[in-house]
Image (cartoon, rainbow, N blue to C red):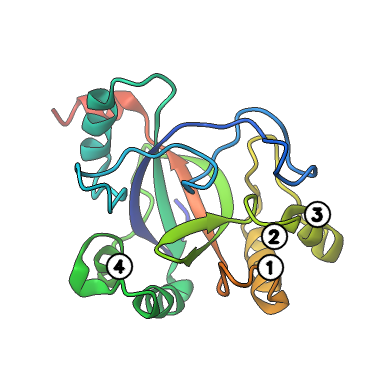
Amino acid sequence: MEPGYVLAGYRVATRADRQDWQDSGLPGPGLVSLSGCVVDLVPVDASGWDDWFASPHEAEIARDQAGKSGLHVLGVGFASADVPGLLADMADGGWDASAGSLPERLTRREKFPDSGHRRLGFELVGFGSGSWHTWTCIGNLVTDVHQATGVQPGPSGLIQDEQDARRAAQWLTDSGLGDPKVFLWAAALLTDTPRATLQTQE
């Protein structure tokens, strides 16, 4: 289990192929992301304002009810050290712990991941304009990060080494290259939640 990570929640998402507008330094097929900029997300309810599920079981039910092929349940966690900055960033954008969902879970600092989760890697993400952006959806950030730090994504578009991911997120924050969409970047830990584990909870 990864030490020092807390639960953000669960996303029900498609996987995506690299589009022409995305950085050419990004691998092509089967990209994994928590960002609605590059993948389709299933919302928690019909209002569509929230797509962070509280548990893998809730996310699995939503995936089944969506009736769409290619959906996967992703577990998402952030390093405990990054949580205060992320909460402040979200509050500045009008989303604080009193609204529930993601900021409320981060405030609780529930340990992540649970047993049975398979680590997929780390994605560089940031909050802006009410949504989560990924480094693969803005400009040429994948190439910029690689040239500056040597860090690059693996076959699924994720960074495999935790320290590399955190170093790249810090460099992106310091560079200001995400302006005006993202000013604070973090390395989100993404996991795959086995369907068999969920069936035992029903």
Q: Amino acid at mark 4?
A: Pro
Which residue type does callout 1 highlight?
Answer: Arg
Would you place residue 106 above or below residue 18 in this image?
Answer: below
Amino acid, disc 3? Thr
The residue under the point 55% across, 42% down is 38
Looking at the image, which residue is at 46% across and 58% down?
Answer: 132
Q: Mark 4 — residue?
A: 103
**Residue 171 x %, y %:** 71, 72
Residue 196 is left or right of residue 40, and the answer is left
- Of labels 2 and 4, earlier in sequence is 4
**Element class at badge 1:** helix
| CA–CA distance in space, label 1 to label 3 | 15 Å
Assign a secondary structure to mark 4.
Answer: helix
The quadrant where residue 175 appears: bottom right
Q: Quadrant of residue 75?
A: top left
The residues bearing labels 1 and 2 have C-alpha atoms spaced at a distance of: 5 Å
Instruction: Give how far across and how far down residue 54 sits, in percent.
Output: 24, 50
Few, some or many C-alpha atoms within 10 Å of disc 1 (few <14, some 14-19, many ≥20)?
Answer: some
What is the C-alpha distance between the residues marked 2 and 4?
26 Å
Whether pointer 2 and pointer 4 mark residues with C-beta atoms closer than 8 Å, the reply is no
Which residue is the site of mark 1?
Answer: 167
Q: Is residue 95 left or right of residue 155?
A: left
Indicate which label's residue lies in the foreground, 1 or 4.
4
The CA span between labels 1 and 4 is 24 Å
Q: CA distance from mark 4 to mark 3?
A: 31 Å
Q: Nearer the viewer, residue 169 or 46?
A: 46
Q: CA distance from mark 2 to mark 3?
A: 15 Å
Crowding at label 3, few (<14), some or many (≥20) Cα neighbours within 10 Å? some
Comes first in the chain, label 4 or label 3: 4
Which comes sooner in the sequence, label 1 or label 3?
3
* Numbered badge on residue 164: 2
Which residue does the numbered mark 3 point to in the structure image? 143
